[in-house]
Amino acid sequence: MIDATRKPILILGGTGKIGRRLNERLTARGLPVRIGSRSGTPSFDWEDNATWGPAMQGVGAVYISYYPDLSVPGAAEAVGAFANLAVQNGITRLVLLSGRGETEAQRAEEMLKASGADWTILRCAWFAQNFSESFFLDPLHAGEVALPVGNVGEPCIDADDIADAAVTVLTRQGHIGQLYELTGPRLLSFADAIAEIGKAAGRNIGFKQISHAEFAAAIAAHELPAEFAWLLTELFTEVLDGRNEALADGVQRVLGRAPKDFSAYATETAATGIWSD
């Protein structure tokens, strides 16, 4: 166990997919945790830098997850400013959740490195849990997922693997200055992933490739918050273009085991009934 864990670990985005799992794991180990969110005590808001200092007071390390995503304009500058403030306050152990193939995410990584922190970067592929804890739930329930993406393979990573990796790099020696690319063990197209979910759920769920214009119209019809509408458009026009069609060994390097396969995720999640019609 490293010294930084004797003080609370600040988890930014502590109520999100990864932050929630990280909180559960650290708490189960008896390690002190502070949740960094608008509803936290003290509150933390990426859009209000006056909240940053109070949230980081007395902590030993920080897990940084940017809301809503590192790919949005201004995210890199915010992460850099936060990292600089943390180092000025004597908090040097910083772990960043980053994204593969995202230009702004890679800029944020460089900002983190430039702060002088003892950094570790977890650069992640598409989350498997986006199909069960996010914007895909409604179309899955409806029986058809329509996206502007073709036969592009994505090595979906399970959120539990990311959380396990975050626990390891935060609590054990040997991970400072390391960048880990976390992917699942195989490439799946979105059509493949939807088919596996349908099979696991015992339902006939279809996949339809649509144009970017049709996708934009569908997003507008759902009246999503502006930042999510922008993010979805960015992901499906820029990031999911084949640039990430490669596996990486980050999970093996951090955890010493293979990453969880998407089929295991689909089977376990279907058993909860969340995809039932």
Image: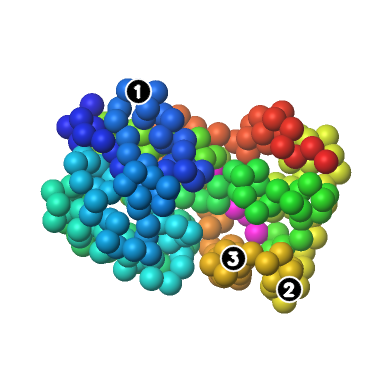
Which structural element holds mark 3? loop
> Residue 169 falls in which quadrant of the image?
top left
Cβ atoms at labels 3 and 2 below 8 Å apart? no
**Closer to the N terminus: mark 3 or mark 2?**
2
Question: Camera-side residue: 259 or 268?
Answer: 268
Q: Residue furthest right?
A: 204
**At x 36% / y 30%, what residue is drawn?**
26
**Closer to the N terminus: mark 2 or mark 1?**
1
Q: Is residue 256 visible?
A: no
> Considering only vertical position in the picture, is 102 above or below 55?
below
| Residue on which the image places disc 3 | 225
> In the rendering, at what x and y percent does residue 185 appear?
55, 40
> In the rendering, at what x and y percent does residue 42 appear?
31, 47
Question: Camera-side residue: 48 or 95?
Answer: 48
Dot 2 amino acid type: Ala
What range of the chain is rendered magenta? Answer: 152-157
- Magenta-colored stretch includes residue 60: no
**At x 23% / y 54%, what residue is drawn?**
53
Q: Main secondary structure of the magenta part?
A: loop
The local crowd at label 3, few if under 14, some if 14 to 19, many if 20 or more residues have their Cα within 10 Å, is few
- Of badges 3 and 2, nearer the viewer stands 3
Image quarter in which the C terminus is found: top right
> In the rendering, at what x and y percent does residue 12 appear?
37, 48
Dot 3 amino acid type: Pro
- How far apart marks 3 and 2 lie (CA) works out to 14 Å
- Magenta-colored stretch includes residue 155: yes
> In the rendering, at what x and y percent does residue 62 appear?
28, 45
| Residue on which the image places disc 2 | 217
Is 119 left, or right, of 230 in this rendering? left
Cβ atoms at labels 1 and 3 below 8 Å apart? no
**Closer to the N terminus: mark 1 or mark 3?**
1
Q: Residue furthest bottom?
A: 213
